[in-house]
Amino acid sequence: MSNLTHSTAADLAAKIHAGEVSSVEVTQAHLDRIAAIDSTVHAFLHVDTEGALAAARAVDEDVAAGRPVASPLAGVPLALKDVFATKDIPTTCGSRILENWVPPYDATVTRRLREAGVVVLGKTNMDEFAMGSSTENSAFGVTRNPWDLDRVPGGSGGGSSASLAAFEAPLAIGTDTGGSIRQPASVTGTVGVKPTYGGVSRYGLVAFSSSLDQGGPCARTVLDAALLHEVIAGHDPFDSTSIDAPVPPVVAAAREGAAGDLRGVRVGVVREFTGEWYQSGVLGAFERSVEVLRELGAEVVEVSCPNFDYALPAYYLIAPSEASSNLARFDAMRYGLRVGDERGNSAEQVMALTREAGFGEEVKRRIMVGTYALSSGYYDAYYGQAQKVRTLISRDFERAFGEVDVLVSPTTPTTAFRIGERVDDPVAMYRADLCTIPANMSGTPAMSVPAGLSEEDGLPVGLQIMAPALQEQRMYKVAAAYEVARDKAAGGALINRVPELEVAR
Amino acid sequence: MSLSTADLLDYDEVLERFDPVLGLEVHVELSTNTKMFCGCPTAFGAEPNTQVCPVCLGLPGALPVVNGKAVESAIRIGLALGCEIAPWCRFARKNYFYPDMPKNFQTSQYDEPIAFNGSLSLELADGTVVEVGIERAHMEEDTGKSLHVGGATGRIHGAEHSLLDYNRAGVPLIEIVTKPITGTGARAPEVARAYVTALRDLLRALDVSDVRMDQGSLRCDANVSLMPRGATEFGTRTETKNVNSLRSVERAVRHEMSRQGAVLVAGGEIMQETRHFDESTGTTSAGRRKETSEDYRYFPEPDLVPMAPSADWVEQLRTTLPELPWERRKRVQTDWQLSDLELRDLVNAGALDLVAATVDAGAAPDAARAWWVNYLSQEANSRGVELAELPISPSQVARVAALVAEGELTNKLAREVVDGVLAGEGEPDAVVESRGLAVVSDDTALYAAIDDALAAQPDVAEKIRGGKVQAAGAIVGAVMKATKGQADAKRVRELVLERCAG
């Protein structure tokens, strides 16, 4: 076990900037770790060894020359979800249709990471086009959960969450359309944040559902997530839906929260997030975490958000509808896979053959559902109605945030399930996002923080904390306070209890 | 598909039995420097695929940002057409697959156009005024261009392969849609042409587009249907595309009326379909027939935020509207003291801009008008080109007019000078010089010619001396002949009388 791979990003940054360790050493340690264990975990789709070391060297040169470093995270390695465009590095979205596609441009998130001196190690595995909750829908193989290699690391960002839990990277970037950052964080005992919609630029993020997609930070500690949040967030003129407002002071909030005082903070427990689909060990861990918040001085009340019950069905109309349109561009004409390009085949036939061969089952299912939901004669009953539900969910949030500062719930109803367990039951798979979808529907921020292990299977459980739009500092403060208290009570960080992985020969 | 005349109904018979209904959709490419949703240039004629970026190529992850200048142009067009401007509207996605459309959806506007409910009044050749209702004007992006190689018709069916140029993809378009145009009867083709002409003039005055039909910066789709005379329920319509000139608009409508008439009279049904106009034959032919009506699965574009042009901004844009064509015509009529007929001739000849420019260059309005509407129009007709395409500029015409006004040229000589300019012989003064066309104003030279003529016709000379002034005409004629017309006849006459009095 290497100190460098098991450190927090904040500690690594401090040591690199102080010249105690070089970014190249830190980066090499992570590359070595990836080389040793990723054949087991399969968190990465592409590892950019040369690019990572070059970026690390540039930071080391700044430090050696006494120049100010580019950001508080300069020199720290990161794993980037393979849904962000990276110039000169393949970007596949876990799909056969984009296999070997190398973008000619950087996403805004990619650019900000590079400009901040963050070292991009490579691109992480994901459910194809971010559609899924287990990373089993990747065209390039499953990713395994470091807590139990027979289980999924969540999804769609299972590669990012697994890379953190496997100590292959101290930081990662995910995207969250219905829970794809928070649910993987929950089942891998890591921290994942979905910022306010519009808080992080979507430019260069390959769209699944444009009105729901949001990039965000993933880390092993709340402070690390906050540091990364401030690097990637902020207005971007290339994304019309980007919010032109200051980034909430999340780093300060995380530091403040670490003092462990939540007096004056009103916490609402969402009454609707319980019932038959919830594992008892998850509910048990959640109840203990609420107790911890109370002990930290928070005032805890129960609130009702009745329309959250309709979030899941409404989501499965809106997201596929937008996806059916967003994914239309993958037609073999300009880039990506091309099948059937031979004499006698029309352009239309090439498009159809390519899409048939290039998309996986879940993607096709959603394209068909979405196409149907947008069809004339059905639009009002499906897409239109779902948008109304969305408004009702937003109103539930507004009403609740009139009473409390943050809302809390389990992040996901169960712990990590077994690989293959839900692949034939899409609806069971969809239920993994029961608690996370409402925040996507309303565009409000939410995060998952490790909340201990479930009694019956010893697997990680996540506590979801939700805040009003652009009030991320509230949830970071609560999360940081909870993290400190929980780690103290448990005698150490939850992540340190992940089993040591066998190093591949 | 070949088309025999048997497939067409005699035009008069069409009108005996049916009333035509028109609907015109005009796509206008805005002359903004950059595209609708990205910073790529919009210049026409660049090397294929050199004016593209991740956004207009629809690369994965790229996002649109609205071109504010295009919105401004859209609002100004809406205002000039007397439309209401939506205080809140959105873009929508129009979903369909086509290789020249990078995202396989077109970012357009659907049920929330930026401008709606306006009108445009047109004047036909005989002065009849027709008011055409405007349903809407909305913003959208253009597609790329496909070049189908190997097929007989340049269309995708039967082509060997296709080449794609995305330079045009994302160029801002305004689509202007009329309300159904009814009650035009036999004049439907003329109305269609007059509408596109009036719209073109309006857009040119607004300086928002090149409005070049030949380059595709103004494109017209003509919807035509027939209903039995006196009926109120419209017939099934066809939409004719690829109508690339004003003349084609007229021909396409007329042809489609005759074609539909023949189908209906034979007891057939009109298929709702897209048809293509063939410039060379003046006929339309069916595009691929669709089994079901197209379902574009419109929904609000989630990558763009709604637009809410403030009332203040709209009013401020209203103040930037230039003098509009009909206002200008009214002013010109007053300034140049034209009769209704003279104005109509001027407008119908398409000479208004040219005459105005000629007047601006110093010519008298009457002279400028005479040159363009009479002499040069004939020239353009015989060459088969637009008036403005003649190789002579308003300032050159103004120079010729000035030479006439100064007495340097007679009208006859002036026409020769203009012919010289048209023949590429250079500026008017150079033509005068090289062709030796200046009026012979040297009195000494004229005296010699007069004396010769008087000597040659002593009897006439005698008559003049005897007071028969009208007899001078014969001598003037002889002098003009001797000077090859380059003398000023009036001056010659004066000199003849002076000589005979002396």
Image (cartoon, coloured by chain):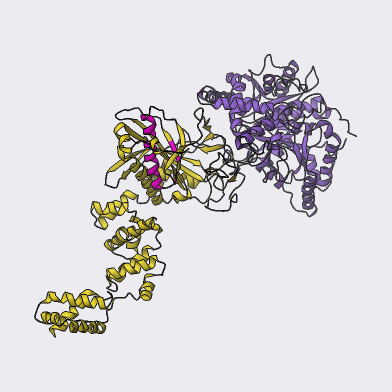
Residue numbers of the magenta segment: B239-265
Q: How far across and down, in percent of the image, does residue B123 sit? A: 30, 46
Can you see residue A493?
no
Can you see residue B263?
yes
Q: Which chain is purple?
A: A
**Residue displayed at 79% across by 31% down:** A165
The image quadrant where one finds the C terminus of chain A is top right
- Viewer-nearest residue: A319 or A356: A356
Left or right? Give the position of A333 relative to B228: right
Q: How many marks?
A: 0
Residue extending farthest to the right is A505
- Viewer-nearest residue: A290 or B419: B419
Q: How far across and down, in percent of the image, does residue A364 sit? A: 65, 27
Q: Quadrant of residue A244?
A: top right
**Magenta highlight on residue B411:** no
The image quadrant where one finds the N terminus of chain A is top right
What color was chain B assigned in the picture? Answer: yellow
Dominant secondary structure of the residues highlighted in magenta in the image:
helix
Q: Quadrant of residue B407?
A: bottom left
Q: How far across and down, in percent of the image, does residue A298 sit? A: 67, 25
Left or right? Give the position of A228 relative to B40: right
Q: Is residue B200 above or below residue B478?
A: above
Q: Is residue A329 above or below residue B217?
A: above
Q: How far across and down, in percent of the image, does residue A239 sit? A: 59, 41
**Magenta highlight on residue B260:** yes
